[in-house]
Structure formats: structure tokens, C-alpha cells
Image: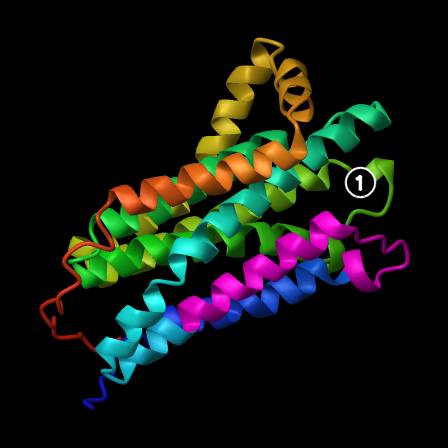
């Protein structure tokens, strides 16, 4: 088994994302007004399972263990749809809570956008699965999405310039969002400059949050945020979860991931 010196950046980003996610979820589970529910438990569990799988896969590639990497990769056929389905379910739950509270859901655009973008990144990764580096870059794009979300909640929970301390500081939501957007873009840009032929999916992932904000601004200018929130909140939650799972599973199977599972060409790994 040949050990390589690659994937240090990927492993570092996955590990950092997991650490930031713990901080981001801290108030939800251990804060003064902690009130996690089953939706949060499911979402947190699938998120960390996904990060664990990607960390393991990157470690296997770093160690040159390509066969185990390919075998474990089949877990994506289950875990990927579960991940997107839990994100879709939490989006519906969040929108419904916003409607019931009468305050709306200020995260509706990011929730819906990230759900769709996450699905596209995972499917795209398996469309190009025979190009190992490009395949990995698409999957790492999903990590960058999680990092951005976790960073946002960490900033508004712990960072003094962004911490929400009452209605008079609600403007900090936007400030924290912009800070997170910049950090995600810079990370995506760094991966792109490291390997522009295969790193461009990370650059795309790095601009998805600003893109969502832009779309949100357009919808807000047409007074469509409220109707969108109502539409999402009206979805049946069990059907949303099951339907999202089945659609993404079908999309992954349609890429031919189970057909002709011959050993792919080994591509030399560049040092990170």
C-alpha cells in the first residue's frame, strides 16, 4: 500500500468544519435556551456522518488504499440521499416554525438554496467519478457549504462583533453572513489556485452563499419571500423527506455508479 502526501488540505477542511460545527450547534444543545428537537438530532447526525465518511475516504486515498475507498464510497448511495433529505426536512420545519411564530424564516433562501445545491454537488461528483480529483472536489464543495453554515452560527453565538444579544443587534445577522461569505469564497479560491483544473467546483461552492443572497434580494424586491416561506411550510414533512431521498437516490443510480465497477486509473496525487 503506497502512502501519498496529498489530501492534507481536504483533511484539514473536514476537520475544521467538524470543529466549527460543534461550536455552531453548541447553543442549540447546551445554551441557556437550548431546545433541540428530533429534526435537529437527525440533521446533526447525518451531517457528522457525512463528514466522517469524507474524512475516512480522504484518509484512504492519502494511504493509497483505493479499493477500500471505492467500497466505502457506495455508502454515499444511502448517506447522500439521507443528508439531502434531512436538509430538506429541516427547511420545511424551519419555514413552518417561522409562519407559526409570525416572524417568518430569515433563513428560508439559504435553507432552500443549500438543499438544492447540496444535491447538485453530490450528483455531479458521481457524474465525474472516474476523474478522482474532480470527483473529490465536488464532494468537498459539500463540506464548504457545511462550513459556511456552521461558521455563521458560531459567529452569532460567540464572536463579539457578530453575537446576537437582542433585537437591537439583529443587524449582525447580515454582518455575520457577509463575513462567512468572504471566508468561504477565500477557501474556494485557495483550492482553485492550488489546482485550477480540478479545484473549480470548490470555487463554485464558495460563491453559492452570495448567490443565494442575491436571489433572496431579487425575491424580496418582488415581495416573494413570504409566499416562498408559505409554500415551503405547506409541504408534507414525511413526504418531503421520503421524496427527496428517493429522487436523489434515483439520480445517483442514474449516473451508473453501480455499473462496470472496474478499478479506475490511479492518478498521481500532488503534494498538498
In which quadrant will I find the C terminus? bottom left
Query: Residue, x 71% and y 36% (percent of image)?
Result: 94
Give the extent of the magenta segment: 27-55
Instruction: Say which residue appears at 84% left-offset and 23% top-offset.
Output: 102
Residue 4, placed above or below residue 169: below
Q: Quadrant of the N terminus?
A: bottom left
Q: From this viewpoint, is residue 206 visible?
A: yes
Let me know if residue 266 is in the magenta part.
no
Return the residue nearer the eye: 63 or 83.
83
Q: Is residue 53 magenta?
A: yes
Report if residue 161 is visible in the image. no
Q: Quadrant of residue 166?
A: top right
Which residue ends up furthest to the left in the rendered image? 265
Q: Please state the horizontal and vertical placement of residue 27, each as a whole percent of the image.
A: 79, 59
Tell me the residue at 56%/58% (across/down).
47
Q: Which is the main secondary structure of the residues drawn in magenta?
A: helix
Amino acid at each position: 500500500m503506497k502512502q501519498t502526501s496529498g489530501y492534507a488540505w481536504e483533511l484539514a477542511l473536514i476537520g475544521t468544519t467538524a470543529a466549527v460545527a460543534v461550536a455552531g450547534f453548541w447553543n442549540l444543545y447546551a445554551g441557556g435556551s437550548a431546545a433541540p428537537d428530533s429534526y435537529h438530532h437527525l440533521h446533526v447526525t447525518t451531517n457528522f456522518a457525512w463528514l466522517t465518511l469524507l474524512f475516512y475516504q480522504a484518509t484512504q486515498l492519502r494511504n493509497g488504499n483505493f479499493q477500500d475507498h471505492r467500497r466505502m464510497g457506495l455508502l454515499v448511495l444511502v448517506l447522500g440521499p439521507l443528508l439531502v433529505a434531512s436538509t430538506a426536512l429541516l427547511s420545511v420545519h424551519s419555514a413552518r416554525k417561522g409562519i407559526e411564530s409570525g416572524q417568518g424564516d430569515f433563513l428560508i433562501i439559504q435553507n432552500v438554496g443549500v438543499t438544492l445545491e447540496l444535491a447538485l454537488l453530490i450528483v455531479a461528483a458521481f457524474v465525474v467519478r472516474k476523474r478522482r480529483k474532480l470527483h473529490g472536489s465536488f464532494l468537498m464543495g459539500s463540506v464548504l457549504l457545511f462550513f459556511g453554515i456552521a461558521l455563521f452560527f458560531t459567529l452569532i453565538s460567540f464572536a463579539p462583533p457578530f453575537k446576537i444579544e437582542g433585537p437591537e443587534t439583529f443587524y449582525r445577522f447580515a454582518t455575520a453572513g457577509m463575513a462567512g461569505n468572504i471566508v468561504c469564497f477565500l477557501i474556494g479560491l485557495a483550492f482553485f489556485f492550488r489546482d485550477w483544473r480540478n479545484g473549480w467546483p470548490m470555487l463554485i461552492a464558495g460563491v453559492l452563499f452570495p448567490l443565494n443572497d442575491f436571489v433572496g434580494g431579487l425575491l424580496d424586491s418582488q415581495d416573494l419571500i413570504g409566499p416562498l416561506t408559505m409554500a415551503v411550510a405547506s409541504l408534507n414533512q414525511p413526504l418531503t423527506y421520503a421524496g427527496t431521498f428517493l429522487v436523489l437516490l434515483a439520480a445517483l443510480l442514474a449516473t451508473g455508479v453501480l455499473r462496470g465497477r472496474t478499478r479506475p486509473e490511479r492518478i498521481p496525487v500532488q503534494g498538498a
